Image (cartoon, grey):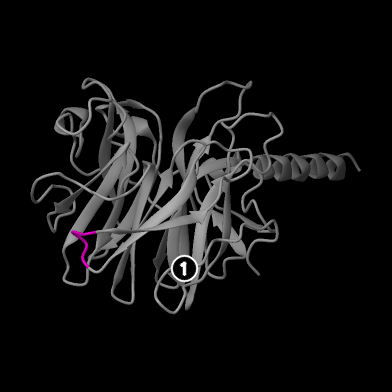
Amino acid sequence: MLRNRISGLILLCAALLSSSGILADTQDTTFVANGNPLIKHKFTADPAGLVYNGKVYLYAGHDQCPAPKERYEMNEWLVFSSSDMKTWTEHPIPLKPSDFSWAKGDAWASQVIERDGKFYWYVAVEHGSIHGKAIGVAVSDSPTGPFKDARGSALITNDMTTQFTKISWDDIDPTVIIDDDGQAYLFWGNTQCYYAKLKKNMVELDGPIMPVKNLPRFTEAPWIHKYKGWYYLSYASEFPEKICYAMSRNINGPWEYKGILNEIAGNSNTNHQSIIEFKNNWYFIYHNGGINTQGSSFRRSVCIDRLFYNNDGTIKRINMTTEGIK
């Protein structure tokens, strides 16, 4: 009888640890999504989706949850995967700012992209010695990691963009695309959007940093994707943030502003999107404050809703739902 009680207590503790996300630090855990927000056992933000080999990999920052603080506290990135967008597996923590010897902290927005069987993770962090935010890149042989610093130094630092803006936090929110001709591009920015070519090794710039023009009220969170010959550059606008977008037939522009894509995501001052195609459907991944009971904008949660195009290639306004995708 005592042995059964002890076994029961062990199982209960394991379930509580799993639901709190503690076990996920060291082993895979699985859960079934039930509407939006998608992930309810941890606060997650700045989502970035990757479709690879029949699965969706979802990368996100982790809003820490100690006593309430009026700032973003993010010390690690998380990764989840799913083959059906319903049942998800949370994998062990694949990357932290401390994995970059030159970084001081802040696991801000990021994106992973695959090339030639390797996975490159572009992240925004606080630089340890050069004032301001910086962009680093990590690499792995697996989409779930572990990842390691691919350069030993930052790819983008604040002093590389002072000719465009004098603020110290403009080098954030990286997004990457590999075009049909094999050329890779990095987009990023706050208050000013930048872009640059990447070398085939994915860890070096292959030309000058250039500003992106004609993005009205650009704040941050650029995301680049392509559909039927159109390039789409979506981004967070104003503050509190809504998502707007522009379109172009050429990745170098000119960009034509198309308006608001989705409105302010409830109880969250920030808004950060990812747009992916999976099994012939398009999805809009974002965060809101849907499970935050503390009344601030610093505990966010990832959500997913469907995305639809009009006949002319423009995108229909996103319908944010509590039901999520089915």
Name the residue beneath numbered marker 1: 55
Going by the numbered disc 1, the residue's amino acid type is Lys
Residue at 41% across / 66% down in the picture? Answer: 51
| Horizontal and vertical percent position of residue 65 | 60, 29
Q: Is residue 141 left or right of residue 41?
A: left
| Horizontal and vertical percent position of residue 159 | 16, 27
Establish if 240 lies above or below 114. Answer: above
Establish if 274 lies above or below 126. Answer: below
**Do we see residue 205 in this rendering?**
yes
Q: Is residue 252 magenta?
A: yes
Residue at 38% across / 51% down in the picture? Answer: 145
The stretch of residues the image draws in magenta is: 250-254
Residue 258 falls in image quadrant: bottom left
Q: Main secondary structure of the magenta part?
A: loop
Say which quadrant the N terminus sits in: top right
Q: Is residue 170 left or right of residue 209?
A: right
Q: Is residue 40 magenta?
A: no
